[in-house]
Amino acid sequence: MAFRIEHIGLSVSDPIAMAEWYARVLGFHIVFSGADQEKAVAFVGDASGNCMLELGRLPGIEPLQSVQSHPLQLHIALASDHPAQDADYLIAHGASFIEEATFKRPGEELLLLRDPWGNSIQLAKRPK
């Protein structure tokens, strides 16, 4: 039996605004979005249509970025043909630069950033 990833769920502080940013800035599409006074959830799909992120705020569950001690504990890795240019674009849209990865395979370019809510994003260029 072989499985595929349907979605990866993240507890975040503002799922609706985060989903809108991921759609507007990263080109993801919002599959579903809803909220009430206590909870909120949004599903966003990447451009390939193969994987979604579930962004949720639920009572009693801390946002992921408040319990992470290092940005590589959990990050959203995005394929990039031009990591430096893409980093500049993301920074212009509210992301912040963390670092260039020092642990990488030959020929890789890996940059770490934070989205406006503090979640880790990695821009990854792999050798052909």
Image (cartoon, rainbow, N blue to C red):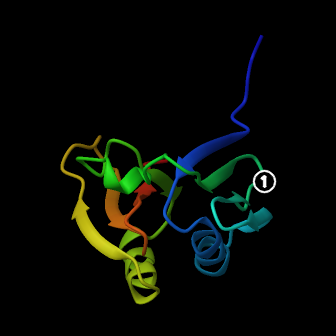
Label 1 element class: loop
Residue lying at 32% horizontally and 61% vertically, measured from the top left: 112
Count of numbered circles in the view: 1
Residue furthest to the front in view is 37
**Which residue is under mark 1?**
49
Residue lying at 50% horizontally and 63% vertically, measured from the top left: 80
Q: In x, y percent, where is residue 83?
A: 40, 68
The quadrant of the picture occupied by the N terminus is top right
Residue furthest to the top in view is 1
Residue lying at 36% horizontally and 55% vertically, measured from the top left: 65
Residue type of the residue flagged with mark 1: Gly
* Quadrant of the image occupied by residue 19: bottom right
Residue furthest to the bottom in view is 92
Left or right placement of residue 37 versus residue 111 in this view: right
Q: In x, y percent, where is residue 55?
A: 61, 56
Work out whether residue 45 can be spotted. Answer: no
Q: In x, y percent, where is residue 75?
A: 42, 50
Work out whether residue 2 can be spotted. Answer: yes
In the rendered view, tell whether residue 51 sits above or below residue 12: above
In the rendered view, tell whether residue 23 sits above or below residue 47: below
Q: Which residue is at the front of the view, 63 or 86?
A: 63
Q: In x, y percent, where is residue 29?
A: 75, 68
